[in-house]
Image (spheres, rainbow, N blue to C red):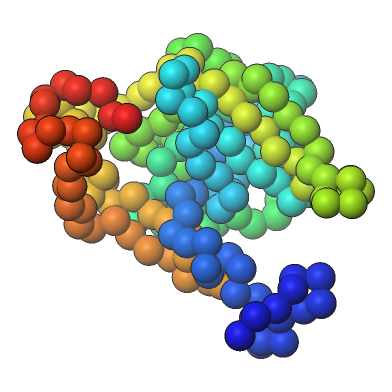
Amino acid sequence: MFYEPQHGHGLPHDPFKAIVAPRPIGWISTLDAAGRPNLAPYSFFNAVHSKPPMLAFTSESMKHSAANAIATGEFVFNLSTRPLFEAMNISSGTLPAGESEFVAAGLAMAPGRMVRAPRVAATPAALECKVVSSAQLRDIEDRPLEGWIIIGQVVGVHIDEAYLRDGRFDTAAAQALARCGYRDYAVVAEVFEALRPSDSGAYVAGQPDR
């Protein structure tokens, strides 16, 4: 089949999010202007640069996380994992402004080192970020949309050393989660390594990821 999104897909459910999958989950923690913590997962999320490391998340409306990140200039990405799925799912619920998803999900907070926003204490890894750019999205007709994109530069990295293997972060051991469209999720339980032609047939320990 072929369809133009502006004319609809004719299916019972929109396939777009299932096609662009799996997508890492941006479990974003922030503080509001009054210093109250907020936590929410975003499936429109990914790393966008490596030197310096940067990542981005998109909110399809001006929700608490996006508003807080723009207002305070910082946020934290918390790695969402299979053992933390239920808490992550609870944190996706809509709470009144000022009520903490950390409390609702039964999650302990840990302080940031480079930012004021807290992180999820139980996560295997967290990235503290400073906002470098934010913009309202526009379509091909240059019409403003409700969605906003926030880009942050990573200024601090927390890693639970239990998930380090030979100097590498073990994604499979951490059981990182991904969103697969609809109400479907995936967990990274196995990975494989493949060398690039430019690797000259040998992986060099400590060589930076290109």
Answer above or below: position of 134 versus 173: above
Tally of numbered discs: 0
Quadrant location of the N terminus in the rendered image: bottom right
Q: Can residue 35 be seen in this view?
A: no
Residue at horizontal 72%, vertical 87%?
A: 10
Residue 36 location, quadrant = top right
Residue 82 location, quadrant = bottom left
Residue 110 location, quadrant = top left
Residue at horizontal 81%, vertical 38%?
A: 136
Q: In this view, does 4 lie to the left or right of 191?
A: right
Q: Position of residue 39 (x, y in %)?
A: 59, 41
Q: Quick one: 33 or 176, which is closer to the camera?
A: 176
Answer above or below: position of 90 versus 151: below
Residue at horizontal 20%, vertical 40%?
A: 197
Q: In this view, does 137 lie to the left or right of 17?
A: right
| Residue placed furthest toward the top | 114
Q: Quick one: 167 or 143, which is closer to the camera?
A: 143
Q: Position of residue 80 (x, y in %)?
A: 41, 47
Residue at horizontal 76%, vertical 23%?
A: 71
Answer above or below: position of 176 versus 16: above
Quadrant location of the C terminus in the rendered image: top left
Q: Position of residue 76 (x, y in %)?
A: 53, 29
